[in-house]
Amino acid sequence: MKVLLIKLSAFGDLIHCLPALDDVLARDDVQEVHWLVDERFAFVTDVFPESVVIHRVALKGEHPIRAAWQMIQELRHEHFDVVIDLQSLIKSSVLAAATGAKAYGYDASEVREKPATWLQQSTCFHADERHVVQKYRHVAAAPWQSVSDTENPLAYQEPRIHRELKLISFPALPQKPWVVLSLGGSWQTKELPNETWQAVAQGIEEQGAHAVMCWGNDEEHAKAKAIAEYAPVTVLEQRLDIASLCSLLKQAKALIATDTGVLHLAAALETPTVSFWGASASWRSGPLGEQHQFVESSPSCGPCFKRQCANFVCMDMICADDMLRCLKDID
């Protein structure tokens, strides 16, 4: 059987999909697995198993319609037996249906864009499947499931990177344990105040480690440099590619971050994490396990899952001392 999985974006979501990908690869009747990803996030697939064939589509480029049409032609020539749409948006469902294979997608009651369900077989989730990893696994199992199989929830499975990664050194960093601070987060409601980051960095130094800040764009780089003016922290000079980022995280004592791709990558590399939550929810997308700890603001209005907010209080309620206590518990 030849299977195509579609998850176009984003960074953290692709990491969350790794258990679903592992499930498909483990099936005896599956001989070939392909993945369709948005070109902007194709860098994440560099940590996928080497056997997975990657297709990249530039839906946010200069000619998105032309790019989509060319990709449809490419996918149709592959003659897939099954398509598993882990995105379940209109754009992904159209691409899935255009392959000519039977497509399976998200639960009709939860899908964000309802027309997506018109083009694929909807998957109904169990009430106890609250985490996105469970839901992705359920959709990925849909082509092989009977009605009776849906009576029990699929378990949460920690995302893991099985691909062998070559570690690189960071000679510019101090010769002491380092804790990576990630300023990433595509939502404004996930941004921590500079003063809180500065207090965290100072506390890390007092615990005998050193704070290292990684960043993903010019805005984050400027924010990191502003924080470093008043705190003992090393700001990486360059934006790291995925291989270098994996090396940094794999050798770190821990990562402190919000709900973002770097957080989930660190967890998949088995690096301990301390994460903070406000607008999003740890029960929905947080890395679970003993080595992962949460600091949650739990405002009365949250979690709201909003990217912007006129009454933004979530991150102001996150205390540096709480994160530092969590960090101190990490061996």
Image (cartoon, rainbow, N blue to C red):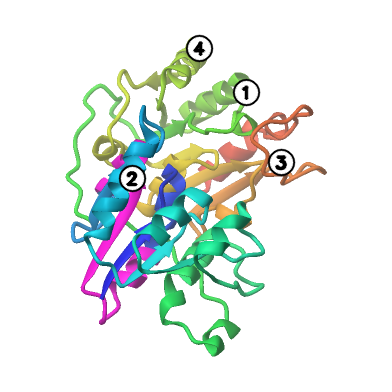
Q: Nearer the viewer, mark 4 or mark 2?
A: 2
Which is nearer the eye, 41 or 247? 41
Q: Residue at x 41, y 23 (%)?
A: 217
Q: Secondary structure at mark 1?
A: loop
Q: Earlier in the sequence, mark 4 or mark 2?
A: 2
Cα separation between marks 1 and 3: 14 Å
Marks 3 and 1: in contact by CB < 8 Å?
no
Dot label at residue 226 = 4
Q: Earlier in the sequence, mark 4 or mark 3?
A: 4
Cα separation between marks 1 and 4: 11 Å
Figure check: 76 above or below 209? below
Which is nearer the eye, 264 or 230? 264
Seen in the image, is 243 located left or right of residue 140? left
Amino acid residing under circle 4:
Ala
Cα separation between marks 1 and 2: 43 Å
Marks 4 and 1: in contact by CB < 8 Å?
no
- Report which residue position mark 1 lands on: 193
Magenta residues (range): 20-46
- Report which residue position mark 2 lands on: 69
Q: Residue at x 50, y 59 (%)?
A: 290
Q: Secondary structure at mark 2?
A: helix
